[in-house]
Every structure is written in C-alpha cells, then in structure tokens.
Amino acid sequence: MNINKILKILILFGLFIGSTAFAQNRIPIDDPRNKIAGLSLFQTSSGAGLGGFFEKNVSSSDKIGTTVRLIVQRGENDYPINYYDPYYGTTYSLQRSDKRRISMLETYFNYKRLFFTDMIANNFRPYVQLNAGPVIAFDPPNVSEFKERINNISTAFTFGGNINVGVDFLWEGNTSFSISFGYDMMKFNEKLDPPPTYYDREGNVVEDVETYTAKSDYSGMIAIIRFGKKF
C-alpha cells in the first residue's frame, strides 16, 4: 500500500474522529498539568512502523516530550526478479526486487505548539510539532539464513527530525487521539542496504538483473496516528 492510500485512509479516519469530538462536552484539554503517554502508528514514503511517546504541558499552549519509534524500510518495487538463463533455456525467480532488510530506531525529543487554546469550546486543538534526535540504522545482509543475518548486522548513525501539523483530541475518560502529517528528514553519510549479488547456475555474476538501489537519504512524507492516555 503506497503513501497516497495511507494518507487517504488516515484523513477519513481523522474526519470520523473529529466529527465525534465536536459532539463532546468541553473537558480540560488546555490544562497545563496534562501528561499523556501512548502508542503511535505511522507511514512514511519509504517504510512504516510503530512507537511510543510521552508528552507533558509546560503551559496551556506548549508541550514537550519524547518519542521512540521503529521504522521498517521497504523496497521500491513489488514484483519478483525473473532471470532468463540462456545456458539452460529456462527462466527462474531470484528474489523479490524490494527485498530490503533494514530498520531504523529513532529517539526524538519534541516540542508541540497548540493553537486556539481557551478559544475553542470543543475538545480538539490543532498544532505544529517539531521532532529531532539520534537515529540508528540496523542493516543485516540480504541473505535468507536468519542466524547469518543476526550475526552480521551492520549499524549506522545519524541525526534526524521532522515537522508535522495535526490535531489533538481528548475525551472524557482521559483518552487521547492525534492525527498529523508532515515531512521526515533522515540522511546518512553512507549508502545503506546494498542489493545482493546474484549468480547463475554456473556461479557467474548476473549483471542484467534489475534490483533496488542502495541509498543514504530516507527523507519523505510522513503520516502519524497516535493513541494515548492522560494521567
């Protein structure tokens, strides 16, 4: 499922949640003592994942917090690699061209600015949020043997961040929901996840196989939904 489909689904879901929020009575969403923790699900231009977050109000309009999330990157295509072996006159599948085995762990510190505090009677607030912090990438070799992958994982470090706009909702019962969209910035000093080398049945390197391309820049659009609990 591509990023456009994910965005449409999240927009529709957000509109549904928003229509429910308008029907709620006013509750203390602007309370400067608020603290919220929960889970987040997200889709980026190159992958998807989940994470956890914590945030607290430092005023009725300002929040600070932390986010930890794991992204599983995916390939650019969704078709198998079919190679024609002229020696045997047969065609066989080597591997999916989007066979990436790379994930990234982000630890972000964030600042959120809420708008229209003490001006809107309902329990929702639009916001702008800034996130930044260290990112570690885990890049195992593209081999089928699990033990070999685990024993040969390489790592890379960088600093990343994103800016997103969204809406917070808070219900009676202290349940929170948030939907946001933005741009994720993440670039490493080296290209990660090089594609594997393929060999024919005689042990020769296959040169004319279309595979994905190793890259260092994983920036792109991001869509996030969050579920939390006020405590």
Image (tube, rainbow, N blue to C red):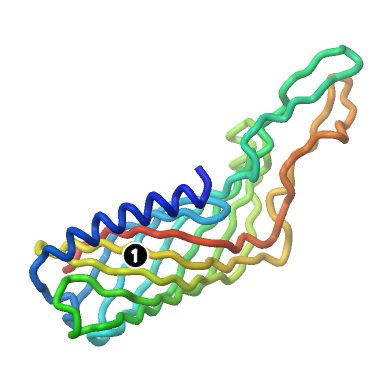
Image quarter for residue 144? top right
Image quarter for residue 110? bottom left
Can you identify the residue that label 1 sits on? Answer: 53
Image quarter of the C terminus = bottom left
Q: Is residue 226 left or right of residue 95?
A: left
Residue 111's place in the image compared with 179, above or below, is: below
Q: Is residue 191 left or right of residue 171?
A: right
x, y percentage for residue 209?
A: 81, 34
x, y percentage for residue 155?
A: 63, 56
Instruction: Give the residue displayed 43% in from the left and 74% down from the top.
Output: 109
x, y percentage for residue 142?
A: 68, 39
- Judging from the image, what secondary structure is the residue with disc 1 in? strand
From the viewer's side, name the closer residue of 158 and 168: 168
From the viewer's side, name the closer residue of 2 and 195: 2
Instruction: Give the residue displayed 86% in from the left and 34% down from the top.
Output: 208
Q: Is residue 95 left or right of residue 60?
A: right
Instruction: Give the residue displayed 34% in from the left and 79% down from the top.
Output: 64
From the viewer's side, name the closer residue of 107 and 4: 4
Which amino acid type is marked by label 1?
A: Phe
Instruction: Give the residue displayed 67% in from the left and 65% down from the top.
Output: 188
Image quarter for residue 87? top right
x, y percentage for residue 131?
A: 46, 74
Q: Is residue 68 left or right of residue 38?
A: right
Residue 57's place in the image compared with 204, above or below, is: below
- Most extreme residue toward the bottom is 59
| Crowd rating for badge 1 (residues with CA inside 10 Å; few <14, some 14–19, many 20+) | many
